[in-house]
Image (tube, coloured by chain):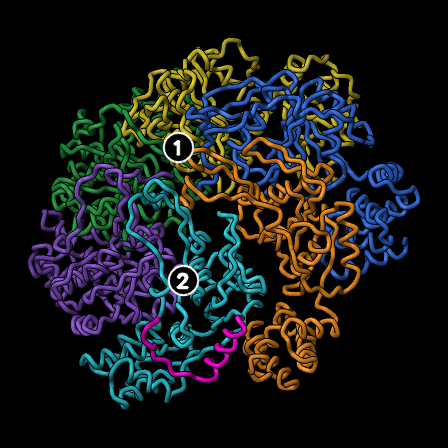
Chain colours: A purple, B green, C yellow, D blue, E orange, F cyan
Amino acid sequence: MVEEIPVKKQQNTEIRAEDFRITEEPFYLPAGNEAVLFQAAYDARLPVMLKGPTGCGKTRFVQHMSFRLGRPLITVACHEDLFVSDLVGRYILKNDETVWRDGPLTTAVRMGAICYFDEIVEARKDTTVVIHPLTDDRRTLYIDKKGEVIPAHPDFLLVISYNPGYQSVLKDMKQSTRQRFTALTFDYPAAEHEITIICKEAGVDQETADRLVRLGTRIRNIREHGLTEGASTRLLIYAARLIRQGVAGADACRAAICQPLTDDEGLQETLDDLVKDLF
Amino acid sequence: MVEEIPVKKQQNTEIRAEDFRITEEPFYLPAGNEAVLFQAAYDARLPVMLKGPTGCGKTRFVQHMSFRLGRPLITVACHEDLFVSDLVGRYILKNDETVWRDGPLTTAVRMGAICYFDEIVEARKDTTVVIHPLTDDRRTLYIDKKGEVIPAHPDFLLVISYNPGYQSVLKDMKQSTRQRFTALTFDYPAAEHEITIICKEAGVDQETADRLVRLGTRIRNIREHGLTEGASTRLLIYAARLIRQGVAGADACRAAICQPLTDDEGLQETLDDLVKDLF
Amino acid sequence: MVEEIPVKKQQNTEIRAEDFRITEEPFYLPAGNEAVLFQAAYDARLPVMLKGPTGCGKTRFVQHMSFRLGRPLITVACHEDLFVSDLVGRYILKNDETVWRDGPLTTAVRMGAICYFDEIVEARKDTTVVIHPLTDDRRTLYIDKKGEVIPAHPDFLLVISYNPGYQSVLKDMKQSTRQRFTALTFDYPAAEHEITIICKEAGVDQETADRLVRLGTRIRNIREHGLTEGASTRLLIYAARLIRQGVAGADACRAAICQPLTDDEGLQETLDDLVKDLF
Amino acid sequence: MVEEIPVKKQQNTEIRAEDFRITEEPFYLPAGNEAVLFQAAYDARLPVMLKGPTGCGKTRFVQHMSFRLGRPLITVACHEDLFVSDLVGRYILKNDETVWRDGPLTTAVRMGAICYFDEIVEARKDTTVVIHPLTDDRRTLYIDKKGEVIPAHPDFLLVISYNPGYQSVLKDMKQSTRQRFTALTFDYPAAEHEITIICKEAGVDQETADRLVRLGTRIRNIREHGLTEGASTRLLIYAARLIRQGVAGADACRAAICQPLTDDEGLQETLDDLVKDLF
Amino acid sequence: MVEEIPVKKQQNTEIRAEDFRITEEPFYLPAGNEAVLFQAAYDARLPVMLKGPTGCGKTRFVQHMSFRLGRPLITVACHEDLFVSDLVGRYILKNDETVWRDGPLTTAVRMGAICYFDEIVEARKDTTVVIHPLTDDRRTLYIDKKGEVIPAHPDFLLVISYNPGYQSVLKDMKQSTRQRFTALTFDYPAAEHEITIICKEAGVDQETADRLVRLGTRIRNIREHGLTEGASTRLLIYAARLIRQGVAGADACRAAICQPLTDDEGLQETLDDLVKDLF
Amino acid sequence: MVEEIPVKKQQNTEIRAEDFRITEEPFYLPAGNEAVLFQAAYDARLPVMLKGPTGCGKTRFVQHMSFRLGRPLITVACHEDLFVSDLVGRYILKNDETVWRDGPLTTAVRMGAICYFDEIVEARKDTTVVIHPLTDDRRTLYIDKKGEVIPAHPDFLLVISYNPGYQSVLKDMKQSTRQRFTALTFDYPAAEHEITIICKEAGVDQETADRLVRLGTRIRNIREHGLTEGASTRLLIYAARLIRQGVAGADACRAAICQPLTDDEGLQETLDDLVKDLF
């Protein structure tokens, strides 16, 4: 399928580091020494892998560290139809001339950005291979279409995230890829931290946040009852926001926490009991 | 396969919000607090997921809410051959110039429409990934073909629907997607509501609608006998319309309700007994 | 693979309703109230699904009803490589201009034809999704390539056929599609009807037709012995035509009925015994 | 992959019936009434299916009948990458003009040729669907790329072949296709016939041919020992030709009959014993 | 993916038989009557299939026979991405003209070369079908892209090779293909022959070659212990060459014979014991 | 998908051997006679296969040998979407002329480089076939797109690597490929060697390196507890670098060694105990 037609007269598309720089400090409450370790890995220019469940703050952490390190952040959401040329770049027609347009990875390599591959296991295998020379002492990107080898900018760092809960035979990360990264493990925030986060993000009072966190904790504890994953901090924030819009607590929890988590009717009843206990 | 050939001289194709605005109030009978919750989610700009069986009114509900909120509605029927460029847009040739044409999602993001993805689990995985940054606090759409990041219009909202009865290992929605939505659960309307709906939609009398609803209820109760799904309100309306055309009640029920539901001969006999009881 | 090259100088290809109108009444012997029900469904503009085995007259019935209703008939034989653009249309180059060419479904929607999808379960899933908005109260066709929504002509009707005997896990019709249609079930004609049909279609005498129908009935009764499907009326007509060419009855039955039905040698012997009994 | 580049200046490529007419009578020894039945089917214009094992003379029979009927013969070897456009035709560029070029099926339909699909079960499903309207009373070919319906020439006939021994779940012929054909079953020729054929085709004496046929018969009788298929007449002719080149009988049989039939060493020994008995 | 861009100004690419003629006699030591049988098959123009394990001399034999017969040799290494157009040819742009470029098979058919398909079972099915008419008495190549039927040059011969050890359900050769070839079976050379070959190819003394052959024979005898295939003559030659470079015998055998054969550690120990016995 | 658009005005892209020459000696500590064997194989121009686990120094060894032999090194990281044209080259448009651009393999063959295919089992099968004629006495590369046979430069050598631990039914290397290579087996370095490497690569003291190596050895010894692969030397170096950045030893080991190795919580505890013993 012809998905893209050559661009003849196009607006200027210069990509500048400023566009990817994070100008306001993203709110992030450290759970442990993850910021220290990230800083050390960055200083040694070792690639970093963030492991952890959905919605526990990995993306926010990368935004936070990019701000702290003063580096632009380029994010690539991985999926199984992401081709190498989507990352590295391609030739396009422009005013009857053919010009090369860098993809996001090439841009990051050149400008010394932090390049963040979200959910790396979803990516195609060829995509994984292209990052290998960027993660060992070569620190180069090979653009086979141009026959060009680009040495990474001294400030460049590759960061990837993945959710170990999704690991499957088909989508496992190969040891030859894994063993190219230092790894930081994330989990749901501790209760007092999560309360602070919910208050800040949803604008609710301490009491509401506390109840929501207690609900979240209980749900995470019944994971062995059949839930694929526990309730993320994000869902607790969603419920808090609905409550702030005037929705009753129990209704907000059902719509923002219980229903998104599962379609199983038995589990919904269990979740409903937990909600009733608290709201 | 070359499916599309560049467009050189094409009629003006400006897309205006007016074309997607719903001008007459679509008939919708609320079953519970779904309208209130949707309103609250919209006010907090939280993405919404509608869960429920075939033909129980999810699409109608979105039309209804779009009218009430005064927002244009752009609907995308998901299927496994829907590519990201079908959603986001592509470059096309026009009068020897190459111009970018926004896809329906980009249009919705720019104009502040409600964008409704019908049967999201049918979509390709890359399609699912593209909506992620629209559903967290970034509220942005990244168009990799243009290297452009579009912040969503303040009025934009993403709504998705899916049928939990179809969930399978292959087409399950990932937790990382689920946990980005508040969820409203739909079911067949209560009897008195369904009677009102049938009378209004098919123009039949109360008595006919009542019998049809009783038939529908009984069929839904025998689901454990092997029916994949119960009879939808839509099918009851179909039968009512055939009756209104002068078809005998039993014939109408067989053609509009029993035969569409299943090919199993044993089940057809069971259904036929239910029909004979009522018509 | 480039399968089609742009058409620069092509003969006029205006599509006119007249080309699809059936001008002579196709012979069809009603088996029950199927014509009445079809008429009622058409009057209520409810989409129709024809269910039944191979070669029992579904296609002929649609031709017949199209003639009686005075509507043009556009037939689409479904298969797994039929793309949405094959149905809806595509842009092509013509005399250096790019013009849009409607596909058969768009043509039918515009001219108010009956559009008949033969063996719908063979179609790709995206094809199925595109007909959804045509089968509910929206009655619209959305052409995403043009960003155009076409309201169906008031006389338009969608008819689909499928053979429940082919149903499989892979090629099942989804409830969300099924529950958009009224359904008429077809089966082999009653004996006296089938005799009349064979006499008329093959030009043989009553006696020959009677023997063939008795053979057909017996074969259909031994389906549980391993035949995937019974002998269709079409095959009985084929045998009758060979007989009319002077072929001996038994030879004609073997060549036109037994051999096409199965490759199993044991079954062939059983079928041969049935033939010998009658010819 | 771009497999074909538009043809600008090409030699004249008019296709004439003469090119496909068989001018010398192909040698064919009838085994039974197959020629009579084919003639009758042709006179009634009923499509014909030839069933039988590899190398037993199906292709030769079609050539023979085409000669006898004085009709051109167009053969299409089916395989799983044969697209509809390979059969029906496509648009190509020629001297800056775009012209339509008929594929072999369209050519046959227009000129009234016998169109022979060899090993039809190997074809893609869409290919099978395109022949349906040619095999019922419509006798039309629908070219969707041109929106053109071509009525078949009165002399046109469709013939297909397939090998029931290859039937598998994946490559079975659907009943809806099977029940559109009369069927002639082929098998290895009777001994005296096969001797005549070998003498004629390989130029060996009666004695050699007789021994080869006895070998062939014995091999066919041990099929239950694990051979997928028996030795074809073609292989017996190959052995006869090697013998005629001066190769010793046993060596010729091993190279031309035993080794091509199987890779199983145990079976080779069994076959070798049969060879030693006769040569 | 656009893999190839039209060639506008290209150097002359006339293909001449001389380029494919083998001018020096390739060393080949006959194992039995294979050269006689090949000669007879060539004289009768019967297609030839070479069966045998990896590295036992099939390719060398074809080179040898091509030299002896004075025919050019065109080799095609088969793989699952070899398309028919890679064999038959395609249209390309050249100086604004479109010209046809023959593929290797068409070239061989026209010039009367021996065309050698190496590892035919790896080829795509469509590739196999295209050679069928070249292997029966038609001896023609049908180029569907040009609508041209090319009669084979009288000197043309088709030769294929395959390794019965690779046969699998997925990649089996169909009987309808097998039964079009005479077959010659190859195996590892007899000990005295193999010694001569190794001396000649690696330039080592008789004693070294003798030890290597004894090692090879023992390894072939332990195939039932889990080796997929025995040590090829090629590997013995490799070891001999390393020895000739001054590497110690045991080290050379491990690097050139044992390690390439298997990754199984237990088997490596067994192989190592065999090596130690001899070096 | 159109991934690449023709290049009209592009910077000069001459590829020179100097660009691929390694100018500084890469640090490599020999484990045994691998350098001697590689030298002998190179002198005899025998292709070389490097077998061994992830991160044990195969790539570094090839860089080292390329430097010692004074040959340019061209590396190709194999993956399942690497097409033959990516290796061999393709035609591209340049200033309205079409020019051929050699791929990395062709470049290596012409300039006499060492061409290194990293993780060959990941490559597509067609890619594997294209190297066959380069690995036997033909030493030629056949470019089918140009109909050109390129004899390899006398200094050219093909080197491949693969990890036996990844071998699977789907991605096994065929014997017909394996038996074309001499093979060198790699493993983790001996303790004293590994200490030297870590000191040199990470700049830590002997004591730290010693502890890390002891940890690495213990982890490799518990592989049977469920680890897919042991800790590579690379990971030990990573930990050493974090320590050098001031991170506490245990934290560094967890982030750089334990977390990258596995997601299994039980295994993490076991690994943690090993860490605690040493740091």
Most extreme residue toward the top is: C24
Q: The C terminus of chain C appears in which quarter of the rendering?
A: top right
Q: Which residue is mark 2?
A: F76
Residue D56's spot in the image, x, y percent? Answer: 76, 39
In the structure shown, which secondary structural element does the residue marked by tag 2 occupy? strand
Q: Which residue is mark 1?
A: C84
Q: Name the residue rendered at 58%, 50% in the picture.
A: E123
Disc 1, disc 2: CB below 8 Å? no
Residue A184's spot in the image, x, y percent? Answer: 24, 70
Same chain for labels 1 and 2? Say yes or no: no
Left or right: F100 as drawn, with respect to B114: right
**Residue B123 seen in the current view:** yes
Q: Which quadrant would residue D275 be assigned to in this image? A: bottom right
Residues drawn in magenta: F22-45
Residue B94 within the segment the image draws in magenta: no
CA neighbours of label 2 inside 10 A, class few (<14), some (14 to 19), many (20+): many
